[in-house]
Image (cartoon, rainbow, N blue to C red):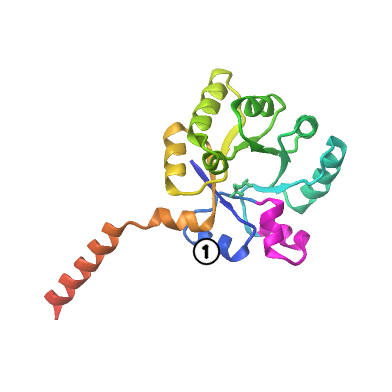
Amino acid sequence: MEFFLDTANIDEIRAAQRQGLVDGVTTNPTLLSREGGDWRKQAKRICEIVSGPVSLEVVGTTAEDMVREAEDLVGFGPNVVIKIPMIAEGLVAAKTLSEKGIKTNVTLVFSAMQALLAAKAGATYVSPFVGRLDAIGHDGMQLIEQIRTIFDNYEFETKILVASVRDPMHVQDSALIGADVATVPYKVIQQFVKHPLTDTGLAQFLKDWEQFTE
Ligand code: E4P
């Protein structure tokens, strides 16, 4: 399973890269707006320091606008993936970009049918938002299972990119289901590392060794 970092923050990307945990990065307008400054410079910098795919999202809502923006954004680096909202015009844009050989990530996916439509449009990735579904009393993981089954049934090459991840269990369950990628906020990635029994076990080993060698 690949891990993408769900951030537009350079320090977070650098820190997770040191741990070997950045196969790619996903941004969105909210994440870029949080960084302030010149978003174009920030996005280009991310594309430079990350060797894997970097999702950059369009903000137009017509297919023409989305395709125009995409043609600009792909100039930011060879690893750019164009993030497109799962709306009717977004499907048109995804199909057009896929025919031009431009990689796409259809985002804001909340149902299996939306994922199926995105795959039929030729999307490289679909991004189902599990955390936002859980937050309204739905089951985000059930959606991942449904999409996995549909994509396997019809041998779609579109990758399932689990998004809106809130905790390590979202990622563990996604891995068990066989999702291709999880995009994870930096603070959640750090939660994977930690286990209280690791910390108490290490403290005991170090204490015993110190007593033995003094
Ligand atoms: C990633 O591609 C999405 O934009 C992101 O995971 C959304 O997550 P949120 O629900 O935390 O905003």
Nearer-the-camera pick, 143 or 9: 143
- Within-10-Å neighbours for mark 1: few <14, some 14–19, many 20+: few
Image point (41%, 53%), residue name = 192
To which quarter of the image does residue 86 belong? Answer: top right
Nearer-the-camera pick, 117 or 111: 111
- The span shown in magenta is 27-48
Residue 92, percent from left and from top: 80, 30
Judge whether residue 191 can be spotted in this image.
yes
Residue 6, percent from left and from top: 59, 52
Look at the image and tell me in which quarter the C terminus lies: bottom left
Q: Residue furthest bottom?
A: 214
29 part of magenta stretch = yes
Q: Residue furthest top?
A: 153
Residue 77, percent from left and from top: 73, 52
Residue at the disc numbered 1? 15
116 part of magenta stretch = no
Q: Main secondary structure of the magenta part?
A: helix
Image point (41%, 35%), residue name = 176
Image point (61%, 56%), residue name = 7
